[in-house]
Every structure is written in structure tokens, then in C-alpha cells.
Amino acid sequence: MMHKLFSNYIEKILKSYNCKNILEIGVYEGATTIEILKWCSKNNSNLTSVEPMGWSGNIPEKYKAAHNDYGCINPRFLSGRINKKFQNLWTVKKELSLNYLKKEKKKFEVVIIDGDHNYFTVKNELESLKKNLADNYCIILNDVYGKWSRKDQYCDIRNIPSEFQNSKKQGVMSAIEEFLDANHGIKVGSLTTADLIINEIKYMRYKNILDKIKGCLRIFRMGSDNFMLDTFYDKYLNTDLKDNVQILKNKKTKNFFLILTNKDYGLGIITNKLEIITKDFV
Ligand SMILES: C[S@@+](CC[C@H](N)C(=O)[O-])C[C@H]1O[C@@H](n2cnc3c(N)ncnc32)[C@H](O)[C@@H]1O
């Protein structure tokens, strides 16, 4: 699904952050990967992808092996397209994200998390990534909205400690919430209520405003206990988004959490440079 968001969101983010080092967790058939590789080749950047599955098809041998007994697929968007230029800028780690992150010291401006969509994995990916974030960073996460945002999916449940398997706390959004609270003092609050507000605004009353920003932008300010949604929407409904961005900037806020949603998906963004992102979405 994430590849459908490339031109609207991901590409703009890569450009805004003047991204030189990109990390992608979860490749599957390579639909997003191929777009990032194309972008990297035009912008003198490099990509590291982490994926445990083995690959068949017309792929350079060095990328094919699987991690342990993980299955094998043909990554059809990559097959026959990995030329020398792409090979020079692309590193593939055939392992589980948490094992890889334990060892990795490199810093990344943009990290795309779309691997094993469960609370345990995402929570630990976020914790482990703290040491790998460049001065201006942006973490993009999939599945933060809709029915899967609070439901665990397990690629191989044997990788999940038993106390976290199908436990009370589930889903990517629960992991993000806990991470933001513990690390940035931000309480996202009841997203159930927030979702209702957003749906009402989006589909019934303010559709034309939201169309302008290609989705719904929710902003939570980190570094305080304030749940920013109400304030944000108060302003948002009466002014335009640019004014709100300015207000947030003036408060010297340091880290932000945004959700970009439409009825099909929710893209979560954790960043310390809100203005970099919003200038492209308003
Ligand atoms: C939702 S798909 C990725 C889709 C891809 N990002 C796109 O836009 O088309 C999830 C991928 O993550 C991989 N995966 C599962 N567990 C993982 C882990 N622990 N670390 C890294 N990748 C993982 C799966 O094998 C699968 O290929």
C-alpha cells in the first residue's frame, strides 16, 4: 500500500530533508523500494533496505538470500531493474529489523517503517532507531489509522516474546503512543475521539479545505503534556494551515507527531522539523 503514497508524500519528504541516507524496513515486492532507488540515483543518495524474505527472479545474486527459513518471493517491481547504478547505492540487509538495528550505527534522515506490523516490533524499532537519527530526521510509519492500527499482525510469531503475542496492547499506533509518551512527553490522548472529529471534519463539513492539503493533517506537539489536537483544529477551522504552522514554530517546539489520513490509510510521521514537511503539504 505504501507505494501509492510515494509521489504525494514520501518523495516530497525525501526532497525536503535533503536526504542522503534513507532506511526502509520491509520491502515485500519492492513497489516503494524501486521509487526510492530512482529518487536516490537522481539525488546522489543511498538506500538501506531491511527484509528477511528470500528473492527469486532477475535480481543480483548478492541480494537473494533469505534470513533463516523465511520464504522466498519474486519482488516483481525490482526484478530486471536493478542495474549497476542502483547496486552502487543500495544495501540490502536480509534479516529482521531488530537484529539489524542492534548493530547499525549509521545515521538516516528518513526512515520508513513498514515491516512487521505489531506492537512489540514497532516499539522496539523506534527505541533502537534513536541512535540512528540524523540532526533533522523524519520517521514515516504505515498502518497508524483504521482497523489495523490497533491490531497486531505477525510475520512469524516465533520472533515475538510470548508475553507480547496477542496481548492486550496491540498495533502500530499503540507502539507509537507509548514511544512518544516515554521519550518526548507527548500524550496522544484518545484517538478514538480524535478520529471521530477528523472524520466529521473531513467528510462532511470542511472537505474543500482538506482537499487542499491532500488529506487530513493532525499535529501533536511533543515536549509538553498538551494534547494539541483541539487547539490545532480550533485554529485550523478559522484560519488556514499556514497560520497554524507558524504558531507552532513560534512556540519553539522541537519534535512533532503528525498523521496524514484519508479513508484508506494513515501515514504517521515523527519529526523534529515540522516546517520542512508542512511547507510541502499546504
Ligand atoms: C507490508 S510489506 C512491505 C510493503 C512495502 N513497504 C511496500 O510499500 O510495498 C511488509 C514486509 O516486511 C517484511 N518483514 C516482516 N517482518 C520484518 C522484520 N522483522 N524486519 C524487516 N522486515 C520485515 C515482510 O517480509 C514484508 O515483505
Image: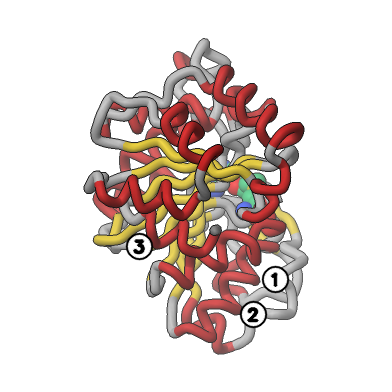
Q: Nearer the viewer, residue 152 or 188?
A: 188
Q: Which mark is residue 78?
A: 1
Label 3: element kind: strand
Residue drawn at point x = 48 percent, y = 25 percent? 174
Q: Residue type at mark 2?
A: Ile
Residue drawn at point x = 47 percent, y = 72 percent? 15
Q: Nearer the viewer, residue 165 or 217?
A: 217
> Dot 3 corresponds to which residue?
108
- x, y (%) of residue 264? 74, 40
Q: Residue type at mark 3?
A: Phe
Q: CA distance from mark 1 to mark 3?
A: 23 Å
> Relative to 201, is 250 on the left or the right?
left
* Location of residue 256 by image quarter: top left
Q: Look at the numbered disc 2 and say if its residue's Cβ is closer than 8 Å to ligand 1.
A: no
Residue drawn at point x = 58 percent, y = 23 percent? 150
State how many labels appear.
3
> Is residue 197 at all visible to an observer of this figure?
yes
Label 1: element kind: loop
> Dot 2 corresponds to which residue?
82
- x, y (%) of residue 8? 64, 62
Residue drawn at point x = 45 percent, y = 36 percent? 232
Marks 2 and 1 in Cβ contact (< 8 Å): yes
Label 2: element kind: loop
Marks 2 and 3 in Cβ contact (< 8 Å): no
Q: Look at the numbered disc 1 and say if its residue's Cβ is closer than 8 Å to ligand 1.
A: no
Between discs 2 and 3, the one toward the N terminus: 2
* Location of residue 60 by image quarter: bottom right
- x, y (%) of residue 231? 42, 31
Q: Nearer the viewer, residue 104 or 55?
A: 104
Q: Residue type at mark 1?
A: Leu
